[in-house]
Image (spheres, grey):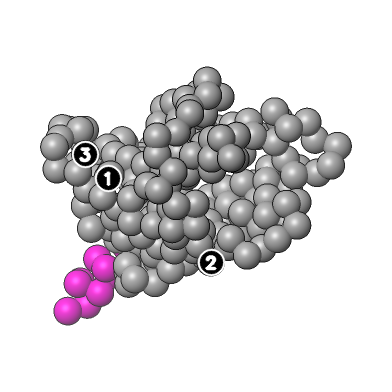
């Protein structure tokens, strides 16, 4: 009995060692978001700075803590039909509030600009992978090991994600979208918990972003044609 207790305590040590990294990493992302939303910060830098923080912090965290890609949910086969279907399905679920507001279906066909196409490509290839590697692959995975209760880990990860978005929406002058971001973060966190596949979370994030871009593009096109 005593041996089992000692073994359990010893197994908790590696998980708890991620605690300081988690606090420092999330704090650094928050600082990057705040700096990115300062009035003096160029618009291009405000977009790049958080992504650079995600990339640098994720790679540093994995290197120092000797994490493997499998530890963050990247296991072969990386992309299957099931992964694709679940990722798109969860992403579409996240986008329901935005699509209902913008009435995407009623405004088809739309006019997609090169900017919109570029934003969709960037969402799929850059912003979604970096965001999900950090938030789901590292933050949520670490919280699940530290909390033992995965529901608590999902709620904490979602809350931290929402907090880091406050500077962005504060600059826009409205915090009304925060509940929507809370829903998005919760759904994607559950998708990662349910599948243990980081590509599912990446596809869900990218699908939500792409559908939002399409919604805004259709809104702009409707304005131009009216």
Residues in magenta, as a range: 1-10
Residue beneath disc 2: 179
Q: Quadrant of the N terminus?
A: bottom left
Label 1 packing within 10 angstroms: few (<14), some (14-19), many (20+): many
Magenta stretch: dominant secondary structure: helix
Relative image position of residue 125 (x, y in whole percent): 41, 27
Q: Does the magenta stretch include residue 125?
A: no
Mark 3, residue position: 84
Residue shown at 70% from the left, 28% from the top: 44
- Residue 132 on image: x %, y %: 42, 43
Give the farthest residue toward the bottom.
1
Drawn side of residue 163 relative to residue 107, left or right: right
Percent x, y of residue 153: 39, 66
Q: Is residue 206 above or below residue 122?
A: below
Relative to residue 145, is residue 20 drawn left or right? right
Name the one closer to the observer, 93 or 168.
93
| Magenta span contains residue 7 | yes
Secondary structure under tag 2 reads helix
Residue where numbered disc 1 is placed: 87
Please name the residue shown 29% across and 39% down the image: 199
| Residue at image coords 63%, 65% | 176
Label 1: state its secondary structure: helix
Number of numbered markers: 3
User: Please, is residue 16 above or below residue 72 in the view?
Assistant: below
Residue placed most toward the observer, 157 or 37: 37
Give yes or no for contact between labels 1 and 3 (Cβ–Cβ under 8 Å): yes
Task: Tell me the distance, in whole angstroms, between the alpha carbons under discs 2 and 1.
Answer: 21 Å
Q: Residue 129 carries which label?
A: none
Asked whether the residues under the numbered discs 2 and 1 touch, taking CB atoms below 8 Å apart as contact, a structural biologist would say: no
């Amino acid at each position: 009995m005593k041996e089992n207790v000692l073994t359990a305590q010893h197994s908790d040590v590696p998980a708890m060692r991620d605690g300081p990294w988690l606090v420092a990493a999330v704090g650094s992302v928050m600082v990057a978001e705040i700096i990115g939303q300062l009035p003096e910060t160029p618009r291009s830098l405000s977009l790049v700075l958080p992504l650079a923080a995600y990339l640098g912090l994720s790679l540093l965290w994995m290197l120092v803590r000797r994490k493997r890609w499998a530890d963050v949910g990247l296991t072969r086969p990386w992309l299957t039909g099931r992964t694709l279907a679940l990722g798109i399905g969860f992403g579409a679920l996240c986008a329901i509030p935005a699509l209902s507001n913008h009435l995407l279906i009623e405004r088809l066909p739309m006019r997609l600009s090169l900017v919109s196409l570029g934003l969709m490509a960037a969402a799929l290839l850059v912003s979604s992978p970096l965001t999900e590697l950090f938030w789901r692959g590292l933050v949520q995975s670490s919280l699940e090991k530290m909390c033992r209760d995965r529901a608590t880990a999902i709620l904490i990860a979602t809350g931290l994600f929402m907090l880091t978005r406050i500077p962005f929406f504060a600059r826009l002058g409205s915090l009304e979208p925060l509940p929507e971001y809370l829903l998005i973060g919760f759904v994607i966190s559950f998708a990662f918990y349910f599948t243990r596949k980081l590509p599912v979370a990446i596809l869900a994030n990218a699908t939500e972003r792409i559908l939002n871009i399409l919604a805004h593009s259709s809104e702009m096109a409707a304005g131009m044609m009216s």
